Image (spheres, rainbow, N blue to C red):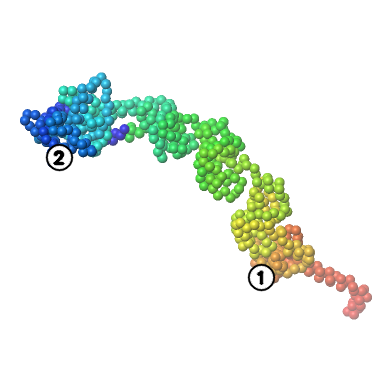
Amino acid sequence: MKFEDFETEETEDFAAMLEESFKKSESKSDLVLGTIVKIDEKDNLVVIDIGGGRDANLELTEITEEDGTVLFAVNDTINIVTMGRGRISYKAALSRVALNEFIAEYDEEQEYIIEGVVTKKNKGGYVVEVDGLEFFMPRTLSYLSSKVEAVGKKVKAVIVKVDKDKGSVVISRKELIERDKAKTDEIVGTLLENKDPVIGTIKKITSYGMFVDVGGMDGLVHYSQISHKGPVNPSKYFAEGDEVNVIALEYDKKKRHLSLSIKDANPDPWADIDAIIGVGDTVTATVSNIEPYGVFVDLGEDLEAFLHVSEISWDKNVKHPKDYLENNTDINVEVIEIDKEGRRLRVSLKNLLPKPMDAFVSANKVNDVVTGVVTSITDFGAFVKVGAIEGLLHNQEVSWDKSQNAKSEFKAGDEVEVKIIKIDRDAGKVSLSKKALEPSPIKAFAETHKNGAVVTGTVKDKKDFGVFISLEENVDALIRTEDLHPIKFDEIEKGQEIKGVISFIDGNTDRIRVSVKRLERQEEREAMEQFNGEEESMTLGDAFGDMLKK
């Protein structure tokens, strides 16, 4: 019930006002029996003999039904009410007769609560029509504000006075409202004092909560006060007419607003979460809400968990959870995280599914040649799906030609033959190579060049740790910074030719290192060996001959 339109100030004496109303009723409205003298359909008039040699005119429409049938004929007698200044009414007479019958049958020992519509307003109060009967409601008993239009308003009131002699019934809305206020205060006082859960009935469900009837009073359960899970959509869990346990939180006396809570009326599962569930447990949950980033599942016990999209399947290309799960279906999940402080649970579905890596390892090994499909391409390579897993084909493994990479050679959906070069079962990673299926130019180079061979290469790139030079097409070597002496690192430019000696070569790992410093030492050693060879070839006579000459 709304109280914002109450008018509580009594500015008139009720008894005097009621008496004045009765006097007006007696002087202006009399119920008499009249005789129809004439029916004039042309002028829409019925002439009635109202006694005492007086005639009065009645509108023909008052005794005409909707289909045009006239209810009475000339010489018929009908009840009419004289309303002053020659005005009479048949319809008002019907209401007066019905009211008299009501008053005659009225039992003073019984309480009558009525519901009607305000049809008129006067200085003293309001006329309320109830099933064709007109009751009087004094302004001071109406609790209706003078600032609000009352005519047409539905009201509920109680009969407080019936005057059988004067044929008047007085009703009071104020009486019912004050009773309701007293009852409300009693209910609220009990709820707030005891703080015990009580049973309420859901009357209405909205987007922001539910209105629940507790002992004849409505209170609001905000959507944040429904479940220990957090804010929920009430329509997903309840229906109008359901009974629920609630606790009163607070009461705003000014607004007459009662706040209720369902969650506080039920045990908090997080208070003893360790006894309910633990990390590693497998539980059955119901899918309650699907979002692009994951799924919310109901674990029962007023607990909700989050299943991230990455925990739905071992397939890393899950586009949307709805492709795998449906609302209101039961699934088995594993608890992977319990955040007591944040009151959050995380679960995994894929942990209970067979791991694709296990099946892959049992069917494949390093150096196997397999065929896969390119699923995606990145700046560093391409992911290739082989069976149920995805392996990485790094740019360095695309081709011996370093100008080629995954972006230049493939597109998603391409079928490609590759060699497995590494399997990391624990990390769930597989490395693939396409160039391993092609002849190695470095291996071919290693067959004709050994350690100590002098080579000349062109500078391709400079790094902090050294310089890369090209020896032949697709054959590169590294000269470490410390192996550049006597060449100065800062003076080296791309395209410059550098001569050195092979210090390391391995055709199996495709690695070649060259050293300028070692070339310098090697040339010095060769010069020394040549010099020593010439000295040994001189005879003793030659040596003394030279001395004698001197």
Residue 139 shown left or right of residue 346 in the figure: left
**Residue found at the very far right of the displayed protein:** 541
Instruction: Please identify, in this view, whether the residue under mark 2 or under mark 1 is nearer the observer.
Output: 2
Q: From where the camera sits, is residue 229 visible?
A: yes
Identity, as a three-letter code, of the amino acid under mark 1? Gly
Residue 26 shown left or right of residue 266 in the figure: left
Question: How far from the left and from the top, in percent, is residue 211?
Answer: 39, 34
Q: From where the camera sits, is residue 12 visible?
A: no
**Can you identify the residue that label 2 sits on?**
41
Question: How far from the left and from the top, in percent, is residue 359?
Answer: 68, 46
Residue 315 shown left or right of residue 247 in the figure: right
Question: How far from the left and from the top, in percent, is residue 307?
Answer: 55, 42
**Can you identify the residue that label 1 sits on?**
495
Neighbour tally class for label 2: few under 14, some 14-19, many 20 plus, Cα within 10 Å? few
Residue at image x 78%, y 64%?
Answer: 447
Sequence-first disc among 2 and 1 = 2
Identity, as a three-letter code, of the amino acid under mark 2? Glu
Residue at image x 14%, y 41%?
Answer: 42
Residue at image x 70%, y 52%?
Answer: 422
Give above or below for 194 relative to 279: above
For mark 1, give the secondary structure.
loop
